[in-house]
Amino acid sequence: MSVPVGHYQYDQVDRDFLEARIAEFSEQVARRIDGSLSEDEFKPLRLMNGLYLQLHAYMLRIAIPYGTIDSKQMRMFAHIARRYDRDYGHFTTRQNIQFNWIKLEETPDILRDLASVDMHAIQTSGNCIRNVTSDEFAGAAADELVDPRIHAEILRQWSTLHPEFTFLPRKFKIAISGSPHDRVAARFHDIGILARPGDDGRTVFRIFVGGGLGRTPIIGQEIFDAVPEERLLATLEAIVRVYNAHGRRDNIYKARIKILVQALGIDAYREAVEAELAQMDLEHYRLTPEMVDAIQARFAVPELSAPDNAAQELASKRRENPEFDLWVRSNTHPHREAGHIIAVVSLKPAGGIPGDATSAQMDRLADLADEYSFGELRITHLQNIVLGHVRQDRLYALWSSLKEVDLASANIGLIGDIVACPGLDYCALANARSIPIAQKLGARFGDASLQAEIGALRINISGCINACGHHHAGHIGLLGVDKRGEEFFQITLGGRAENGASIGTILGPALPEDDTVDAIARLVDRYLGIRQKGETFLDTLDRLGDAPFKEAAYETV
Amino acid sequence: MKRPVRVGAGEKLVLTANRLLDGTIVWRDRLGQWQPVIGAAEKLDAEGVSDVLDLAQARAQADGVVGVYEVAVRDVDPPEPVTVRERIRAHGPTVHPEFAVETVQ
């Protein structure tokens, strides 16, 4: 079997483990169905296997480690959508995929199908270290310093079924990037890691701790600036141990590490971690260059080669076709290798459901990945798909194929690239529906030229305070709230997840669902009227504050 | 402890759950059977719901359902849930009309 590009190649040990795990869960499902296990007993077991019970059915969330899959795995998602669900899947803000119409009795079969392509649903739920996320442009971006996926895979292997960390006070999320441009929202994670080359050629890691969104949004603080590679696992182990020992278990809303870091202060937390490190057997945790190299050898490197005139070919096609040119402007990113480019496939068609893809679209994406990008696909935490290694002279052909399956929306990073959680249409925790308002906003601003004129503007929508739509980090954030059984939306402005992370501030009283889209439209109109040349929405907001936007949003209320 | 559902004027209560095997939303009829349409649900007064709820929860495993609880509805036929959440459960997700659930058999 050939080694896949972009993700780790399983061996027999990995496959034997998955087989045993599925056999165990199959038995648990059978015992639940025959009544040997009560729902209270079964719930933590199913959650450890990614199975939730939502509003309408069971929901299965499948892990996509560091967001990277191959075409065979994408085709398996299409198969699951067709065979076991309602012909579509939903890509999430944790780079995972979830299926919303799953039957309990069929879950073991689904897990067996997943295992046949080296996938599973472990670490997608429960109070454990969740699936590690990473940069969607990893190993491809021109601005990258270190491919973070090698260390992301090491973290996956370290954290999966970690005996100490299976029952943490709450869920625990880690993201890792290897670029100076934070594309993983590192400062909004329990642990955020920025990798860079050290003086000796080995990787060093800047580590943030105690960030998060949800009920209490907090920006993570730097705990260490330059952890050497050989100390990475020991350091992370110590950070999580301190949390496991001292994190609150008496109140679910105060159980995340961010609350503990705030309570202790970052200096005291660092001291506690250093004290833990001082008593650990560091040799046991030492990550040697040989270990890292062994993991790296399980990733195939794409053999990149493009004709000398690839860039000219692309430029020529852009001049010939303004629609294609618009798409290239918003939906591509510079590649590290001449003659290549990174293409981002938007899962946000105007009026569509953010992050949803049909089985036909998944199959087509798999075909296109094989044809244009070494069979590799990445799922972004902004609910889009990346083909990382496209030859520039073939980009037009890729775009033409994407248009045929309604996947060529030119809106990445623009107002139509809306991030939304499933909301009250599916989620048992939600207070309001996220998707309909995303659809209305997407349709209102669907025109590609209008979106280009508005420029960089990110809208994030969450259906409840748990903030799965990352509304705190949206340039415009919408939080659904329940007022006497009816849906209202609170608007926040000024959030950002990348370098210079900040939490959006509340603009004013929540608006009824019917008024919210018009309020956002007025707010955007005001921005277009008052911006100075070259200003983005955030630039204008930083210059003038939120007063003009508040006036616009509430002018008819 | 779960707070009792508030029942306003012109409102009743119905019992709902998810079917254990496939998660389908079901409603308890006057014979104690679980039906997939809210139109079949038995409407209960607030005073009488506690005993019926206890019985339904005790029989949940035998009946093949999970997560039994009460829902406030307007006293019309078919009953219409008071909250958006329960209306979505009764009618299906609002974003996929093709998945709409019938309210009467």
Image (cartoon, coloured by chain):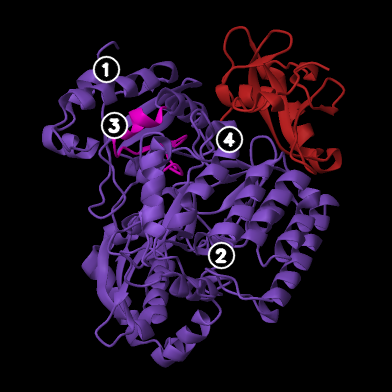
Residues packed near mark 4 inside 10 Å, few (<14), some (14 to 19) or many (20 plus): few
Q: Disc 2 to disc 1, how far (Cα)?
A: 50 Å
Q: Colour of chain B?
A: red
Q: Which mark is residue A374?
A: 2
Q: Tell me whether circle 2 and circle 4 mark residues in contact (CB < 8 Å).
A: no
Q: Which mark is residue A454?
A: 3
Q: Pointer 3 indicates a residue of which chain?
A: A
Q: Secondary structure at mark 2?
A: loop
Q: Pointer 1 indicates a residue of which chain?
A: A
Q: Are marks 2 and 4 on the same chain?
A: no
Q: Are marks 2 and 3 on the same chain?
A: yes
Q: Using residue A414 as the reference point, say whether residue B28 is left or right of it.
A: right
Residues packed near mark 1 inside 10 Å, few (<14), some (14 to 19) or many (20 plus): some
Residue type pointed to by label 3? Ile
Q: Residue at x 35, y 44 (%)?
A: A329
Q: Using residue A317 as the reference point, say whether residue A98 is left or right of it.
A: right
Part of the protein shown in magenta:
A447-470
Residue that badge 1 annotates? A554
Residue type pointed to by label 1? Tyr
Residue that badge 4 annotates? B2
